Image (cartoon, grey):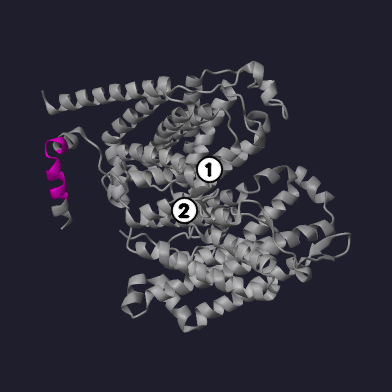
Amino acid sequence: MTMKKRNLLLSIIAVIVLFGVANFVQLEMDAYIRRIVNLCMIYAIIGLSMNITNGFVGQFALGQAGFMAVGAYVVGIFTVPVAMRPGVFYATPMNPAIINIYMPLGVALIVGGLLAALIAFVIGTPVLRLRGDYLAIATLGFSEIIRIVITNASSITNGALGIKNIPPLNDVRIIFLATLITFILITLLINSSYGRAFKAIREDEIAAEAMGIDLFYHKNLAFMISAFFAGIGGGLYGALLGTVDPKNFLFTLTYNFLLIIVLGGMGSITGSMLGAVIVTAGLEYLRVFDEPLELFGMAIPLFRPGFRMVMFSVLLMFCVLFWRKGIMGTEEFTWDKFVNFCKHPLAYFTKKGAHAE
Amino acid sequence: MEFFQAFANMTAASFAQHMANGISLGSLYAMIAIGYTMVYGILLMINFAHGDIVMMACYFAFFGITVFHIPWFMTFIGTIIATALLGVVIERAAYRPLRDAPKNSVLISAIGASFLLENLANYLFSGRPMRFPDIPLLSQNIAVGGGVQIQAICFVIPVITIISLVVLLHIVNHTKTGMAMRAVSKDYEIARVMGINIDNVISITFAIGSAMAAIGAIMWGIRYPGITPMLGVMPGLKCFVAAVVGGIGNIKGAVLGGFILGLGEILIVAFFPQLSGYRDAFAFIVLILILYYKPTGLLGETTTEKV
């Protein structure tokens, strides 16, 4: 059995095992756990999408919340059953052009992703000429503009009231499949010639251009793909919550994904997956910090609402100051490494120690 | 068509009102933009936390007057000093350890610092909006005829801004510290070789930028009294845009950019009331336009990129 076949077999086994876990969570666990697992996977999709531009192409874009909003609103607008729409749009009647258009969730997700990609194309043309800091501010600004437009376009988006009664998506298995497809597609993309071009741009733009890589084309492509998956993730997020509201998509939401990719490693797909699980589950379990805590009959004054987010921002600062590579750096988890590690667990540590010398 | 309608309906008095609003908002933007442009000129990084330094300054002044009952002018001086210190502390803790790190890491650290300040303010002062105390002398309305009243602070803000600008330009152009700052922003490495203590110069830059932000923040609080932990976010982003419009690294440019954005924002809403929901989008559209057509800003110098 060749290495390649062995690795494929291991991957298939891992997917089956994980699907089994998803199935178990769906059938046996309570709603709270299901929700956290769903959120982990959705955040993984969006973290991966952000890693394409920020980790692989090295363009620091902060527009993820805006693209998520586009996806979530497409799902919100088109999956609410037609009969329930007058109840949702009670303040401003819905625009007659779209009031009778209904889409099933799958179609709405794809449409949302494509619309996000289209917006990314329109935004990207002027914005991707900028670099570094300017790009960060401009994409952040556009993410806010998307939110402002959504807040003001009441006859389509119901404005600041948000859209309620979205048929909830509460199946861990479906979200697992969506995450798996995203993971596979992005892995294929990064291992293709496009992926190599992306990494070349990250390492040195001028050298990459001299080697014949069309900078603008590749940056724009990466930005669009990133927006597409952010739109899909946003759509799933909207369907998971069952309501969408412009306030859900403040640009601070993007910081969650920033922490995910910084913690997991900028430029590592498996790192983003790990980061998403750690950050999402961590944020959920850090809720303890928001509750008043009593130890030995004494109330600890530190613990009150808001402390969780302070810890969260300290964690982000800590990562970037002292642990810049994150968990994976730009490395990936591979079966070869895993098998080697299983064969010689001790050699792994000694070799690493020697390397550090 | 609607533009002319709105223009025709506008009396001289209400035009004066809009101009007063626009000039005072522009001056406030200018004060905050100076901090961005100085830091960018020297470290080539956006101090994302600058807007949140403004927010903290508002809270310092609020607590000084409302909670500790310190006379307002003493509070204002204390606020300026405390904010300058805060700026220096942020630089030491979040930016200095990353001096030789890739630029994206510094950017993430800056975002982290900004997010930390917001969450800290939310935790310490609660997310409820608080009312900035009234300073009777400055908060009163002055009748200017035609039934229009303009707040006294609107006249004070541009004056203070111009005085601060003159003092700052004197420091930068005619003192030894200022010379060191200009040297560091021209060439970091050479300045170090010539015996300039880079770390001190950077600390002083942050102190001055934050002090300017504090002056702006106090006036901001008197003009727009609702203060919340997220207060600094939008002004922060817009003032960065103002600094870019004027030419980043250029102090006069930052002031010019601040006035363009402040006046533009107010006048657009005055002439096109139906666009008032899109007020915050104006700055970002200006940013895209300026970076597209004149990336160095209105008063900036052109530089070529080196390999």
Disc 1: which residue: A143
Residue B181 at what x, y percent from top left?
44, 75
Q: Nearer the viewer, residue B4 or B183?
A: B183
Look at the image and give the residue range highlighted in magenta: A341-352
Compute the Cα span from label 2 to label 1: 14 Å
Which amino acid, mark 1? Ser
Neighbor class of circle 2 (other Cα within 10 Å; few <14, some 14-19, many 20+) is many
Place residue B192 in its image quadrant. Answer: bottom left
Our reading of the magenta stretch's main secondary structure is: helix
Q: Nearer the viewer, residue A357 or A269?
A: A357
Q: Nearer the viewer, residue B136 or A70?
A: B136
Residue B2 at what x, y percent from top left?
77, 43
- Kindly state the secondary structure of the residue where label 2 is placed: helix
- Kindly state the secondary structure of the residue where label 1 is placed: helix
**Chain to which mark 2 belongs:** A
Disc 2: which residue: A134
